[in-house]
């Protein structure tokens, strides 16, 4: 039995994104102004984000058309393949079918351009010259640099210091696409200097980097801020990968029983599962949704659901989300994209209403799973994606114990080609498992 790639033609590329907000009986709680703690009006949010992003953030349309220019540029790498992991199935001796959506096929090597591209398009339409942003492991920063180069505008990227040091080739990639990158916290912003004054040796956090990017954007007339996860519009953009997955499974004559994604801020998990929510919520179909996170940053499994800032400098709107606290500083684990204190409100709604299950995994266990996958399927995954692989392997073993045929689908959110230092540390026995017990309840 050989690996099976399920391809779509570019004529099959979805022409709309899926918006889950109309499905919820109760609307999500609105973002609050950080100064007044009153619900923010769209025009206030548009002072920070591109106008097109906020129009989508507030939309109640279930299907949102993909702009033609965005659709054409999606075709640089989309549709991406859905691959049946038959070698892994055989290794595990499971009756389950295991599929993975290969988002490592994009130029930056992750799912992140799915939202970077439309956000850059909105910025170009608005006449902006620069988009500022943060990045953890570098996937988002490289994605935004790629898409801004496509539209001829600038990207300013604040990269979390620990990942900046761990992943130097992400820096090279960002610079190759004309992006300007600095380690965060930096001396370039007031808030960055305050973080360094408090702790000169800090590893940095996504929350700190967000603060720097927002400060720079709000002080410039021709720049705005772009976020790669958490917000509604980001997950809606990412639904293109879930829509493709749905079409590919149908082409293979299958429906999913289990859908899995790693969860840092919620974008790739959300992108995979959103198009299937109408089956679950409206039709009552039993599809198991699993969000896989790190024990070092267990936002869903240990966090509180409450209003909190998205950044460490208390500059962003307050959002009602699962959070470990905006001042939380996680250990410098290699899964840099999962080192975020908060979770997308959409994903939080799925978790609080029992539509999904969250599981937290240790570093050593996810790298063991990654190497099992690499030695069967050949692909070396990003440490973030390895969390989803670990959850998929656990589900496949459970199916074996129960002698149950089922379809397990996970999002391979990015390749690990720039993460080999992490594999070196694991193979040398240098990785330690890190646990965080969460804030006081």
Image (cartoon, rainbow, N blue to C red):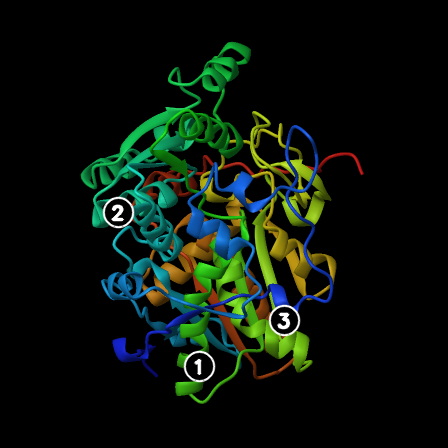
Q: Residues within 10 Å of mark 2 (few under 14, many from 20)?
A: many
Say which residue appears at 63% left-offset and 51% top-offset: 345
Q: What is the distance, in whole Å, between disc 2 and disc 1 at their CAs?
A: 30 Å
Q: Which residue is mark 2?
A: 146
Residue 290 position by quadrant: bottom right
Number of on-image labels: 3
Q: Residues within 10 Å of mark 3 (few under 14, many from 20)?
A: some
Say which residue appears at 47% left-offset and 57% top-offset: 268
Q: What is the distance, in whole Å, between disc 3 and disc 2 at their CAs?
A: 34 Å
Q: Position of residue 377 (x, y in %)?
A: 35, 67
Q: Which mark is residue 288?
A: 3
Q: What is the distance, in whole Å, between disc 1 and disc 3 at their CAs?
A: 16 Å
Residue 147 at least partly seen: yes
Say which residue appears at 48% left-offset and 86% top-offset: 254
Q: Secondary structure beneath disc 3? A: strand
Compare residues 140 and 93 and report the one nearer the observer.
Answer: 140
Q: Which mark is residue 249?
A: 1
Residue 9 at least partly seen: no
Look at the picture and state if 422 lies above or below 64.
above
């Amino acid at each position: 039995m050989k690996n099976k790639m399920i391809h779509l033609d570019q004529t099959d590329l979805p022409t709309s994104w899926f918006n889950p907000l109309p499905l919820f009986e109760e609307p999500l709680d609105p973002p609050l102004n950080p100064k007044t703690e009153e619900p923010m009006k769209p025009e206030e949010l548009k002072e920070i984000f591109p106008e097109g992003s906020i129009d989508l953030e507030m939309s109640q349309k279930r299907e949102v058309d993909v702009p033609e220019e965005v659709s054409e540029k999606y075709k640089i790498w989309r549709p991406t393949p859905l691959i049946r992991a038959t070698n892994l199935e055989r290794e595990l001796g499971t009756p389950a079918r295991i599929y993975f959506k290969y988002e490592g096929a994009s130029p930056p090597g992750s799912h992140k351009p799915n939202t970077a591209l439309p956000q850059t398009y909105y910025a170009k339409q608005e006449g902006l010259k620069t988009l500022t942003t943060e990045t953890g492991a570098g996937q988002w920063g490289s994605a935004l640099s790629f898409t801004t180069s496509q539209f001829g505008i600038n990207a300013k990227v604040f990269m979390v210091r620990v990942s900046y040091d761990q992943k130097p080739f992400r820096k090279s990639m960002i610079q190759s696409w004309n992006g300007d990158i600095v380690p965060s916290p930096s001396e370039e912003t007031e808030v960055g200097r305050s973080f360094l004054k408090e702790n000169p040796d800090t590893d940095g956090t996504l929350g700190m980097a967000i603060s720097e990017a927002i400060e720079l954007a709000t002080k410039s007339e021709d720049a705005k801020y772009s976020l790669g996860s958490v917000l509604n519009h980001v997950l809606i953009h990412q639904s293109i990968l879930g829509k493709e997955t749905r079409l590919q499974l149908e082409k293979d004559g299958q429906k999913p029983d289990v859908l899995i994604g790693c969860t840092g801020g919620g974008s790739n998990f959300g992108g995979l599962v959103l198009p299937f929510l109408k089956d679950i919520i409206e039709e009552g179909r039993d599809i198991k949704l699993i969000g896989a996170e790190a024990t070092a940053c267990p936002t869903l499994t240990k966090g509180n659901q409450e209003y909190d800032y998205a950044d460490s400098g208390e500059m962003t709107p307050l959002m009602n989300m699962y959070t470990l606290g905006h001042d939380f500083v996680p250990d410098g684990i290699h899964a840099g994209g999962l080192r975020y204190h908060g979770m997308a409100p959409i994903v939080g709604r799925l978790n609080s209403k029992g539509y999904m299950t969250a599981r937290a995994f240790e570093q050593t266990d996810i790298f063991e799973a990654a190497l099992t996958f690499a030695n069967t399927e050949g692909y070396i995954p990003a440490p973030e994606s390895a969390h989803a692989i670990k959850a998929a392997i656990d589900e496949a073993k459970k199916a074996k114990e129960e002698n149950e045929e089922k379809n397990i689908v996970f999002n391979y959110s990015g390749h690990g080609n720039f993460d080999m230092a992490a594999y070196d540390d694991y193979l040398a026995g240098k990785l330690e498992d890190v646990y965080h017990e969460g804030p006081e309840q």
